[in-house]
Image (spheres, rainbow, N blue to C red):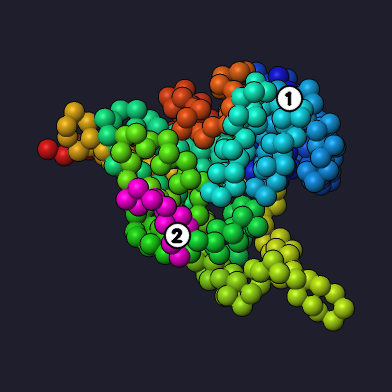
Amino acid sequence: MKIVVLGGAGMMGCIAVQDLAHSEAVDEVVIADLNMERAAEVAGYIQSSKLSQIQVDVRDHEALVGALRGAQACLNATVYYANLEVMGACLEAGVNYTDLGGLFHTTLKQLQLHDQFETAGLSAVLGMGSAPGIPNIQARYAADRLDAVESVRIYDGIKPPPPDQVTFSYAVPTILDELTMNPMVYQDGEFLAAEPLSGFEDYWFTPPLGLLPMHLSLHSEVATIPASFREKGLRECFFKINYWGMAPETVEKVKVLADFGFASREPVQVDAVEVAPRDLMVGLMGKYVPPILSFLEPPKKEPPDWTKEIVTEVRGIRFGRPVTYRLGTLTVKGSLPTGVAPSITAQWLAEGRVTPGVYPPEIAIDPEPFFDQLQQRGIPTQVSVTEFI
């Protein structure tokens, strides 16, 4: 099978490329990126005969369609702003599709393409990074075992860096959006907008993470899970994270800049030049992104020190009694699930394991085989059940 990874030279895309290259089922992996220097760096590091590189600008529709033709699946690891355009190109090229998420609002727009994909005999799975993605499938695992579902609470715990370490854990534009846009929560059967960096609570994660402060953040899980489990009576759903894996001190600095208008997309006249403050801020913050190769698992060496647990707590009723399922997917060292989860999904799409149409992960992906695939990559999922008498 042939799989095209858009943004394959990026922070999360390169992890997906590495996982795909290691898969026996995959024959060819195309690193499709605007930055050819970085694409060559990634390919040279992974050292696989399956890899090829092509320069693609997702804003050039014809070139994008041409790059996708002949592939069985497209793994879109670009910033979510391009999701709809890439899906349109996949429809034209006849290619199945998956991505890392649409930050709630874009995900809802993508779901509207269901009929077009179904008619074309193509399949799309939206939001298959680590989160969204893994929490959706965790929620499905629990919901399948409950007669009624009352709440789905998601906690994404990431090992905090030292206070003086200024780094961004993934795409700077996405982090800026999550920091400044209103988180959406599902409460008592309706969607409500909360304030950014609100809803704080301390949550216990599996060691070595321990107790972490968690807050609300805009995320795609909340866009789809309420509809997927509405018939089981779902009344509450939220997503919380601990400062997006960054030091609180770094988040506070970015927040101050945003409060002063540096996150605005509205151009500002500076002498004879118009500049969007947000573009300037994103450009300057790019130097605080870790080197791309630091995200890849080195051959025969110590793997990256990722410490992250994605936990979904699902409360509901089973056999007339209140029950809480807690599913925790833990990465201590090894491949980051943000790249591995879409790699698994892209392969399943290429194999025709997903019904034609556009779906969220909790509808499209069978939990147990998926967790087994993660386990094979050193990313285990623990399930605990608490029954209240």
Can residue 32 be seen at all in this image of the molecule? Answer: yes
Q: Residue at x 59, y 44 (%)?
A: 109
Q: Is residue 347 visible?
A: no
- Seen in the picture, residue 85 relative to 146 is either above or below; the reply is below
Q: Is residue 225 left or right of residue 346?
A: left
Image quarter of the N terminus: top right
Task: Give the mark nearest the N terminus, 2 or 1.
Answer: 1
Magenta stretch bounds: 183-195
Question: Which mark identifies residue 193?
Answer: 2
Q: What residue sits 59% from the left and 23% below the top? A: 356
Residue nearest the viewer, comparing 369 with 269: 269
- Single out the residue that lies furthest toward the right: 272
Residue count near mark 1 (Cα–Cα under 10 Å), binned few <14, some 14–19, many ≥20: many
Give the quadrant of residue 4.
top right
Which residue is most to the bottom? 271
Percent across and percent down for residue 135 are 44, 40
Kindly indicate the quadrant of the structure image that contains residue 52: top right
Q: Amino acid at mark 2?
A: Ala
Query: Residue 185: x, y in percent?
Result: 41, 53
Q: Which residue is mark 1?
A: 94
On whether residue 217 falls in the magenta region, the answer is no
Which secondary structure lies at badge 2?
A: strand
Residue 265: x and y, percent?
69, 66
- For the C terminus, the quadrant is top left
Q: Amino acid at mark 1?
A: Gly
Residue 191: within the magenta? yes
Which residue appears at 67% of the width and 62% of the height?
Answer: 288
- Element under label 1? loop
Q: Tell me if residue 253 comes above or below residue 199 in the rendering.
A: below
- Secondary structure mostly seen in magenta is strand
